[in-house]
Amino acid sequence: MTSSPYIIGDLQGYTPQIARLVGMMTYARQTTIDAVQGLTIDQLDHLHDEKSNSIGALLAHIAAVETAYQAITLAVRDEHSQYWRAATDLGEEARRIIRARPLERYVDDLTRVRSVTLAEFAKRNDQWLYEQTPFWRGQPANNYFKWFHVFEDELSHRGQIRLLVKRLPR
């Protein structure tokens, strides 16, 4: 067992492969939160141009994608409000709806959603990771890939967030 975020390995309460997935997801989440520390509501709502997503919308999207995959793979259902639908889809509706929220609310959503994922992962074993179902374009995918996609999507949007932070008006 390790306490360093830079070592992927065993974690108490998880089977070996799930522990490795949790380690990667935990590191990805911490770097996302680090990228937005100290941002104001105006900065979170800033639109770089008329087609961009705000940093706040990207944070909401990260939480919304995770809730979607909780439903897909863990049979956990969260309320699918207009806010969550907009966060999932991004675009025009997200630019209109996802606004005027302090950073703490986005971080609270990310933390709440992740706590559900971690509790559910603790109930599963490594065999569950390899269970396959039809996925994109009818191709089979296992739960391991689906959850890899959750944090891969987060890392992609974290990159967008870092770019947007650098381009915030001074």
Image (cartoon, rainbow, N blue to C red):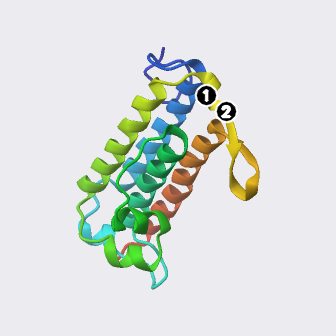
Kindly identify which numbered label has been placed on residue 128: 1
Residue 6: x and y, percent? 52, 29
The number of discs equals 2
Work out whether 93 lies above or below 28.
below
Numbered disc 1: secondary structure: helix
Q: Secondary structure at mark 2?
A: loop
| Residue plotted at (47% across, 48% down) | 66
Question: Label 2: how many residues lie within 10 Å, few (<14), some (14-19) or many (20+)?
Answer: few
Q: Which mark is residue 89?
A: none
- Which residue is label 2 attached to? 131
- Label 2 near label 1: C-beta < 8 Å? yes
What residue do we see at 61% from left, 44% from top? Answer: 146
Looking at the image, which is closer to me, 63 or 1? 63
The quadrant of the rendering that contains the C terminus is bottom left
Relative depth, front residue between 41 and 76? 76
- Position in image of residue 161 (x %, y %): 45, 62
Residue shown at 47% from the left, 18% from the top: 2
The image position of residue 23, as x and y in percent, is 51, 30
Q: Amino acid at mark 1?
A: Trp
Q: How far, Cα to Cα, is label 1 from label 2? A: 5 Å
Vertical comparison of 67 with 167: above or below:
above
Q: Is residue 79 above or below residue 72?
A: below
Crowdedness near tag 1: few (<14), some (14–19) or many (≥20) residues, C-alpha within 10 Å: some
Q: Could you tell whether 98 is left or right of 31 in the image?
A: left
In the rendering, at what x and y percent does residue 21 appear? 56, 32
The residue at the far right in this view is 139
Residue extending furthest toward the bottom: 50
Residue type pointed to by label 2:
Glu
- Front one among 135 and 41: 135
